[in-house]
Image (tube, coloured by chain):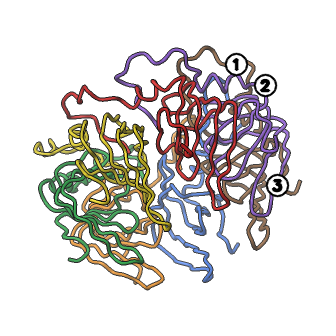
Chain colours: A green, B orange, C blue, D brown, E purple, F red, G yellow
Amino acid sequence: MQISMASSGPQNPSQIMPLELVDKCIGSKIHIKMKGDKELVGTLLGFDPYVNMVLEDVVVYEISSQGKKVTRLEQILLNGNNIALMIPGGEGPDN
Amino acid sequence: MQISMASSGPQNPSQIMPLELVDKCIGSKIHIKMKGDKELVGTLLGFDPYVNMVLEDVVVYEISSQGKKVTRLEQILLNGNNIALMIPGGEGPDN
Amino acid sequence: MQISMASSGPQNPSQIMPLELVDKCIGSKIHIKMKGDKELVGTLLGFDPYVNMVLEDVVVYEISSQGKKVTRLEQILLNGNNIALMIPGGEGPDN
Amino acid sequence: MQISMASSGPQNPSQIMPLELVDKCIGSKIHIKMKGDKELVGTLLGFDPYVNMVLEDVVVYEISSQGKKVTRLEQILLNGNNIALMIPGGEGPDN
Amino acid sequence: MQISMASSGPQNPSQIMPLELVDKCIGSKIHIKMKGDKELVGTLLGFDPYVNMVLEDVVVYEISSQGKKVTRLEQILLNGNNIALMIPGGEGPDN
Amino acid sequence: MQISMASSGPQNPSQIMPLELVDKCIGSKIHIKMKGDKELVGTLLGFDPYVNMVLEDVVVYEISSQGKKVTRLEQILLNGNNIALMIPGGEGPDN
Amino acid sequence: MQISMASSGPQNPSQIMPLELVDKCIGSKIHIKMKGDKELVGTLLGFDPYVNMVLEDVVVYEISSQGKKVTRLEQILLNGNNIALMIPGGEGPDN
């Protein structure tokens, strides 16, 4: 979704911008829910304007009719295109 | 959907622009209906031109054939891409 | 769909441009058919170039195999992305 | 689909450009086939570069397993995003 | 799919560019396979950078589980968005 | 997927860029796997930045539950939008 | 997903940017998980801003209800559009 930022006065200064929230997560745990039934938890090492994310010590949870598949990966680059929501400091679906 | 703003006189000045509506919600409750069967209620802390939203004290409602799953999260960053509609001051599907 | 406006003489001056049609609806009722089986009727308060719409006194109709679900909402911001067509002055699927 | 217009000599001058075809339809009947099973016939009043169309005296045909549903609407704004093809002067699926 | 044309020497000069191929079809028959099960054959009158195409003496073939539906149309504007491939001089699926 | 090329030192000079790989295929065989179950083999005559491809002596393989359908075409323009991967010098699924 | 980089102070300098991670993989093994059930392992020779990737000594794993299909390919160009995540130095689903 895009919203036009034109034709309006100064925005509410007391906001926490999405960028700041993600930037603060660098070096900490983040729980990411993807579109569909995949979730990940890992330590955020970096990201770019497309919210592609470099993550370390990653646990991937895939929930399907056959149950929950858990995969551990040392370091990954995640395509930001399918992120639904992020939970700073989140420990994952079991917590 | 995009509409061309070219070749037309000044727009109706007595409008409430989408941006203003969201800006006024900063610090207040907002009920968000996603595409598909997910809804959220939370306090809006900030947003950007892609309507990515920083939300606090969040309740996520997922309605499926197995019933309604409710998840409570302290703070999240929501990808604006899948928002269907927003209800300023809304209390969620139970209210 | 996009069409190239290049390499052609002046367009037909006696047109009603899409923008003008929506602009004239400010303050009046509008019936909106979404992609899929959702329809809304409400009073249009404002819109932006992405056809995100601020609507008041809104009735949402969701037609499914279980019948028609009707929801009334005071004020909403609708993501323009899933609009199929709009009927200026329309009263909704029952009328 | 997009095609690169770079690195080539002058285009064939004896073309009828898509824009000209639509422009000539202003004030006349046009039959529009949408992606999926919806068709419309109406008088074209105006359009923009996104092929959003202002139409009058509109008949909407929705073909489903339950048969053909016909809806008559005075004036509409059609989102150009789901147009498959247009037939200038077309009278609709029954003709 | 997009490919970055940066950081490389001059491209192979002995190419036939996609634009040239389509341009040469103006005034001749072209067989178009759409995404899904629709095919068309017609005479190409013009096209734009979005490969929207003005076609004349058109035959539309729709192949479904109920068999093949053939529709003849005098003149159409085809949305280039759903084209899979084009066969210059092609006579259609029966030939 | 897009990746931000900003804020980084000079890229690894010893790369083979995607553009170079395709450019080298001009005049030779290339095996193309599309999204879904369609594959093609043909001689590459040209391409543009959208990876639309002019191909000659083309064999199209469509694999479905009814078996493998093989179609031979003299010359085509392929919409680059649905390409999954390309195999320079590839002879097709039977080889 | 896109995030606005505007209106914020300098970003956290101690990041590992996505671009750097991929750049470091040039000449080494990389395990790529696609959207859907396809995975690849190969040696990365080059990539562009759309993350189209030139890969060598490639093994493609396609997991379906009929089991796992393994295909070996000398050299390919992969369309970056359907990449879900990448694992630098990864050896593939069996390891």
Question: Residues under labels 2 and 3: Cα distance?
Answer: 26 Å
User: In terms of depth relative to the viewer, which is nearer, G12 or E66?
Assistant: E66
Which three-letter amino acid code belongs to the residue tagged 2? Gly
Question: Residues under labels 2 and 1: Cα distance?
Answer: 10 Å
**Residue G80 picture location, percent across and down:** 40, 43
Q: Nearer the viewer, mark 3 or mark 1?
A: 3
**Residue A52 picture location, percent across and down:** 29, 49
Q: Residue at 53% of width from left, 60% of height from top? A: C44
Q: Give the residue number, with chain letter if any, for mark 2.
A: E27
**Residue E59 picture location, percent across and down:** 82, 43
Does the residue at mark 2 contact the one at mark 1 (Cβ under 8 Å)?
Answer: yes
Q: Quadrant of the N terminus of chain A?
A: bottom left
Tag 2 secondary structure: loop
Q: Give the residue number, with chain letter if any, for mark 3.
A: E69
Is residue C93 placed above or below D18 in the rendered structure?
A: below
Q: Are marks 2 and 1 on the same chain?
A: no
Q: Residue at 59% of width from left, 68% of height from top? A: C39
Q: Residues within 10 Å of mark 2 (few under 14, many from 20)?
A: some
Q: Are marks 2 and 3 on the same chain?
A: yes
Q: Nearer the viewer, mark 2 or mark 3?
A: 3
For the image shown, how many numbered marks are present on the structure? 3
Q: Residue at 58% of width from left, 23% of height from top? A: E17
Point out the residue furthest to the front here: F95
Tag 1 secondary structure: loop
